[in-house]
Amino acid sequence: MANNANAAGTWAETRNDAMGGTGVASSRWSSAALINPALLTKNQEGDNVGLLIPSAGMQITDPHNLQDNIDDISNSAEDYLNYTFIPIQQIIRNPGIYRQMQSDAADLSSQLKDVRGDEARAKAGGAIAVSIPNETLPFAFVAKVYGTAKVSSDITQHDLDFLDGIANGTVIPNRDDLNNLTSKGFGRVGIVSDYGVAVAHKFDIGGVPVSVGVTPKLQQTWLYNYSTSVYQYKKNDISNNRYRNSDTGFNIDAGLAADFGDSWTVGLTGQNLISRDIDTKVVDGFKDTYQIRPLVTTGVAWHSDLVVLTTDVDLTETKNFKSEANSQFAGVGAEITPLPWLAVRAGYRADMRSHESNVFTGGVGFAPFDLVHIDLMGLYGEDQTWGAGAQLSMTF
């Protein structure tokens, strides 16, 4: 299952994700194409090639275990709906069958009440990049994928009243009643993949080094609109092709970075500068629209050989499906490098719109011989939110 991976933007990069989802002013040159292409100019003398192969991360928020509970409802419903094949008068004349039907109706009603109003969300992302630094026009080939998924339910009062009435004996159902349950289960998934070439150049403006970068890219989108009776919901069916719609288009990312002295960097990046609206398939009378909108983020970083301190703030909202509320993130992070081959990182990321959970992040990085870089991260936050990421890269 797959908005944003672990970071607040449209990328998954383990070092930055461990630092509160920052990176607009603090990314390594070898992963800059994912976040702020202007930082491609930040290579050191002797750097020739950077390989990110790959980076991957995920995040899940499911405080009430909805994904499994809603799946279990369909199993209970199978037992209950078996009574539709038995004439109701025969059920009433048989006290044993009637009591079992009452018990099954009570169990099903209880399960529906447990999931009513609940939702579960998941994010995931991955990326690979090949970066080639040089003095004139550093460039990088980049491929990344990111996505969001949400599971929710619409439990109707009609169903609860009907099932409770059977359970307490005040409702005597007929065959049509047993088949006219109306509660729904929904799964929405949006997955976006980008394939682009990032280029950057450094200028001197009044003695201040300023870098500019752009990433034109091909953008593919897959949308899944799983809408079905909650009594037939199967979590594995969300990715079935019958619920999928796809689209291909063009987009562009751009970024700026300026260095003030040896320790301060200020960055600005715009992801997906071309707005696009893509409709899902109409399934069971329901349709949604996935919104791709410019995401503009500013960042500041202070760095030395031992410590990096950084903060990022979104200047625009993060949008995805129209049926969902928007988010807008701010993050802070730090990295300490006590040994040349070891880095320890921590951070915090908050949604200023209070839609998504605020999270604490942390991670470590290992860089033997400054050749192979292995980065690990984890996060934990409100509403039983957790996530993890890993990354392998090499610099020559």
Image: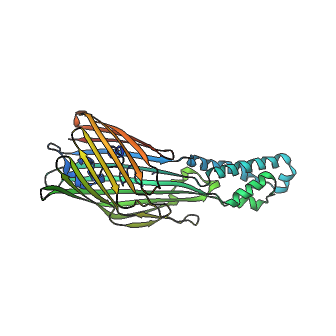
* Image point (21%, 39%), residue name: 305
Asked if residue 85 shows in the view, the reply is no
Residue 259 in view, yes or no = yes
- Image quarter where the C terminus lies is top left
| Residue 180 image position (x, y, % from top left) | 71, 61
Quarter where residue 152 is shown? bottom right
| Residue 176 percent across, percent down from the top left | 75, 62
Q: Nearer the viewer, residue 389 or 191?
A: 389
Q: Residue at x 34, y 42 (%)?
A: 391
Color style of the picture: rainbow
The spot of residue 390 in percent (x, y) is 36, 41
Asked if 366 appears above or below 152 in the picture, the reply is above
Count of number-bearing discs: 0
Image quadrant in which you'd find residue 388: top left
**Residue 184 spot, x, y in % from top left:** 61, 59
- Apparent side of residue 14 relative to residue 133 in the rendered image (left or right): right
Q: Residue furthest right?
A: 93
Q: In the figure, 239 relative to 376: above or below?
A: below
Horizontal placement of 270 versus 324: left or right? left
